[in-house]
Structure formats: C-alpha cells, structure tokens
Image (cartoon, rainbow, N blue to C red):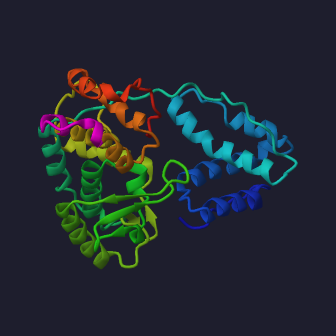
Amino acid sequence: MNKPSFTSNWAAVLSRFCETKKALGFDYQTGILYLLQLDRHLAAPENRGTPFYELVKRWIGKRDNEGANTHRVRISPIREFIKYLISIGHPDGFALPNKLCQKQQRPVPHFFTPEEIRKFFVACDTLKPRKENPVRHFVLPTYFRLLYCCGLRTCEARLLKRADVNLEDGYLRVIHSKGPKDRIVYLSDDLIRLLRKYDNVVDELMPARAYFFPSTRDTCYGSNAISTNFKKIWRLANIGPSDGSKPRAYDFRHNFAIANINRCVENGQDPNGLLPYLMRCMGHSTVESTLYYVHLVPHFFPVVAEQLRFLDVIIPEVDENE
C-alpha cells in the first residue's frame, strides 16, 4: 500500500503513527484502512469545532449492523493510535474505556472431510486470471494449500514477504505474528516443489513483487478478500450442506492441529511429545493453547484426554487467533 492520504487536521500525527508501526516491522494495511475511515470522520464538515474526544467516542461506538468481532477489529487501531498519543505526550491523548466491545463470539470450527478438501482444491484449480489481477489463479490455490499443509494463521500467510520464503533451504520466516514474535516454519519436500513452481511462474508475470502471495506488485490480499474468495471457491466446489458450522479459511488451521494430533494417536505414539513441537509450529505462546484443539472434536476427546493425562492441565478457552 502507498503512503496513506490523510486529510484531516490530524493527518501529520496519523502519518507518523503509521510510520512508527512500519518501522517496528508491522505490516499495518488493515489498521491503515480503519484509520483512513476515522480521518474522514474527523475531516467531515459537520464535525468542525467538535472536540477530538467526542468525535472519537462517536466513531468507536458499535453500529447497529456490526457484529461484536467486526466492532473489535475496527476499533483496535484506534485504541493503538490513542495510546500512541499518550506515549508522545500529545495534549489530546485520553484513556479509552477497557470494555468497549462485547465479548468476542468464537465461531464454531468446521472440520473438513477428505471429500470436502478434495472438491475444494479441484475448484481452486479452475480459477481464471482477471485483468486487474493476472496471477489470481496461481496465488489463491497455492495460498490455501499452504494454510492446509502448515496451519498458518490466514494473516501470516497473506503477509508473507517474498524475502521471508526460503525455497532453497525449505522454510518460511513468520515475522511479528501475534505481537513481536517471530518463528521458522519448515516445509515438506512436496510443498517446497509446489512453492518453487508457483514462485517461478508468478515471478515471470509479476517480477520484483513484494509479497509472496500478491494482489498487485506492491500489495497482498486483505482479510476480507481472502474470506470472499474462500466462500466463492466453496460455492464453486458444490460441496453441499455442512455439519452446521460455517466453513472459513481459518478452519484450515484448526484442521492442521487436529489432523496432527489424530495421526499421532492413530500411529500409537504419545501425543505428549508432539504438543511442544506443534505449539512452536503454530506459533502458540503456551502448550495449553495447542491443547485447546483436543476438545474441539467430542468423539476424539476421550482417547486423547487419556493419553494426555500427564499434562495435568485444564483445557483453556483461547483467543480465536491462537
């Protein structure tokens, strides 16, 4: 994304805040979009003369057509901007209330059947290029396969820079995920071959691109675009009614965790030894966050719970983005 075009009286401060985020290594595209919306609100003629505090308070209020999760995502960059104002001693900095949002509603994960996976990727491979995005039919099938094979968060895969993907040694560098945390994710031989082929083709069509999965030469897909494309491909696959849960791209991550734990148990191995490795691979801060996946499949839980008895932990509720 090019430098954001803020136009209100707060343009200079908003720009410096975004530059600070970029300097810290954060890809702040989604945050900038919401800050641009706030900037337009601040610049609106009808709001002239209204104190900054009142305008922000009005803008961060939950809208009638807005879900709890969407509201939380929308105001998160605003909360960070206000904290920035306080940190630099700006006279208009103020403390926002802690409980602005309703408790996040966790979507019920969808667990893909082998047939659903097969049909989804068959449909993926029928995508066509578009004039505004000539690499779409290469990017999306490979992006979703990476989610399926590695259990990355959807944002982690979206924001991968080309420089973060080492196809010679076979690993990805996930930078600043869930805060200032980095990790290395190693790739299987089959996945390395797929990514090499993909990279060569896309490089010919879009040389010197910044992102591994580009939308344009200098930008990646946004979260809404990924969600929209996943739904389109799901419909294209003509999979039929699901088990009641609504399938999402993020469910590839849930599937990755459950499939690995399940495979370990089926092979007669002790899952206690797997969990620390799975925790690091998925970027969890604690093994309890990884263990959360055990209780997502009721028919699977008794077998694993018995084998995980030595952990002596209570399976916690964790953040949806864990």
* Number of callouts: 0
Residue found farthest to the front: 310
Q: Is residue 213 above or below residue 299?
A: below
Residue under the image location 18 percent in, 34 percent down:
265
Residue 139, x across and y down, in percent: 29, 61
Quarter of the image where the C terminus is located: top left
Relative side of 2 to 192, left or right: right
Q: Residue at 72% across / 34% down in the picture? A: 58
Please indicate, yes or no, whether residue 63 appears anywhere in the rendered image. Answer: yes
The image position of residue 171, as x and y in percent, is 32, 64
Q: Residue at x 54, y 25 (%)?
A: 103
**Is residue 54 inside the magenta stretch?**
no
**In the rendering, at what x and y percent does residue 150 appear?**
29, 51
269 within the magenta span: yes
Q: Nearer the viewer, residue 13 or 83?
A: 83
Q: Is residue 166 left or right of residue 115?
A: right
Q: For the magenta stretch, what is the residue range? A: 264-274
Q: Quadrant of residue 246?
A: top left
Q: Is residue 35 left or right of residue 157?
A: right
Residue 194's place in the image compared with 80, above or below, is below
189 to the left or right of 20: left
Query: Camera-side residue: 106 or 234?
Result: 106
Residue situated in front as seen by the camera: 309 or 261: 309
The residue closer to the viewer here, 34 or 164, is 164
Q: Identify the main secondary structure in magenta.
A: helix
Which residue appears at 51% of the width and 33% of the height?
A: 69
Query: Which quadrant holds residue 287?
Result: top left
Q: Quadrant of residue 254?
A: top left
The picture places residue 153, in percent across and down from the top left corner, at 39, 47
Against 127, residue 112 (above or below) is: above
Taking the image as drawn, is residue 213 in sight?
A: no
